[in-house]
Image (tube, grey):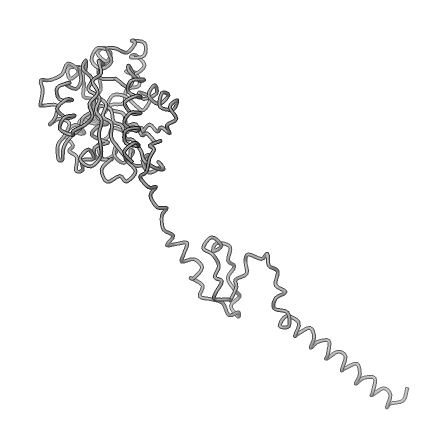
Amino acid sequence: MSPKRLLCAAAMCLCFAGAGALAQTAAPAAEPAAEPADMPGMESSAPEAPAPPSAAPAVVPAPPAATAPTPAAPATPMASAPKPPTAPMTGPVRNVVLVHGAFVDGSSWNGVVAKLQQKGYHVSSVQNPLTSLADDVAATRRVLARQQGPTILVGHSWGGVVITEAGANAPNVAGLVYIAAIAPDLHESTADLMKRAAPMPAAQGIIADSSGFLWVDRTKYHADLAADVPENLTRVLSAAQVPIAATAFNETVNHVAWKEKPSWYVVTTRDRAVSPEVEKFMAERMNARVVSMSSSHLAPVSHAGAVADVIDRAAREWSRQQ
């Protein structure tokens, strides 16, 4: 080949190589819409379509050389997400929260739970530590926070003090039911109310241990707390009793739920732990709907069906008023 033809061939090769390189360099800019639609790690630069808060954890930061939106913007909605709104207080009531008293645990409500569940209620039984009023109120509020919609809050014995405090300012508590329960007024304690009557027989069987907790003498548990409960069951209850801090009976309430919520009260006329006269006084003071029951102090055990009926009545009466 002549030198002239060699020179022409070289020039043509250079032209084709330059054109190919130019095409490769320009391809990404020529087709911006070719980015796959199913890449959650890629951010859109369009201001009118920001990534939703739920997609924020999947965002992959842009390389340092690239232009990207303000880095904190996608995470801000996640950090400041509002809490779910409280369920509206409209009937019917389908939730019941039960709060036990001293010298028993949540299992003392077992019969009542079964009856209420048969009636279609969503029932929760609080396990009080019985270490202080504040601790028991906190345990009750944790259970109340899990209820969706109107709730009837029920307390037995010492549990009445707990629901008096815990039920105040609780937006989902529709009403209160006291079962042979202590219902103090503002800055009033259990000890204050018990002084309104002569000492009850059960007081003689309560023993304090070296740690400041109170127990019921097992030999007196049946007669003083559960005379109408079969003795074989009473032996189980006394064996599983939960002691209460002695200081709890002198603690006062700072909020009074029964002043802002409708209340029902079961007076146990054969009670040897809380005076029936004191029970009547508390029920009348709170203007509660009163039901008298010929029962020992442990009415939730000995009269589970009747107690469940009172709670059901409270739920139905509140629901009808809505």
In the picture as drawn, the residue positioned furthest to the top comes out as: 231
| Left or right placement of residue 230 versus residue 271 in this view | right
Res 240 → quadrant:
top left
Residue 258: percent from left, percent from top: 19, 33
Identify which residue, 169 or 35, lies in the foreground: 169
Q: Is residue 13 above or below residue 121?
A: below
Task: Determine the residue positioned at 47% across, 61% down.
Answer: 50
Residue 227 found in image quarter: top left
Residue at point 19% right, 20% down?
267
Q: Quadrant of the N terminus?
A: bottom right
Residue 241 picture location, percent across and down: 28, 20
User: Which quarter shows the C terminus?
Assistant: top left
Residue 6, compared with residue 71, is above or below; it is below
Q: As displayed, is residue 67 above or below residue 83?
A: below
Q: Looking at the picture, does residue 237 appear above or below residue 23? A: above
Say which quarter of the image contains residue 230.
top left
**Direction bottom: furthest residue:** 4
Side (left or right) of 16 relative to 315: right
Residue 156 in the image: x percent, y percent?
24, 24
Q: Position of residue 282 (x, y in %)?
A: 14, 26
> Is 283 positioned to the left or the right of 111 in the image?
left
Number of numbered callouts drawn? 0
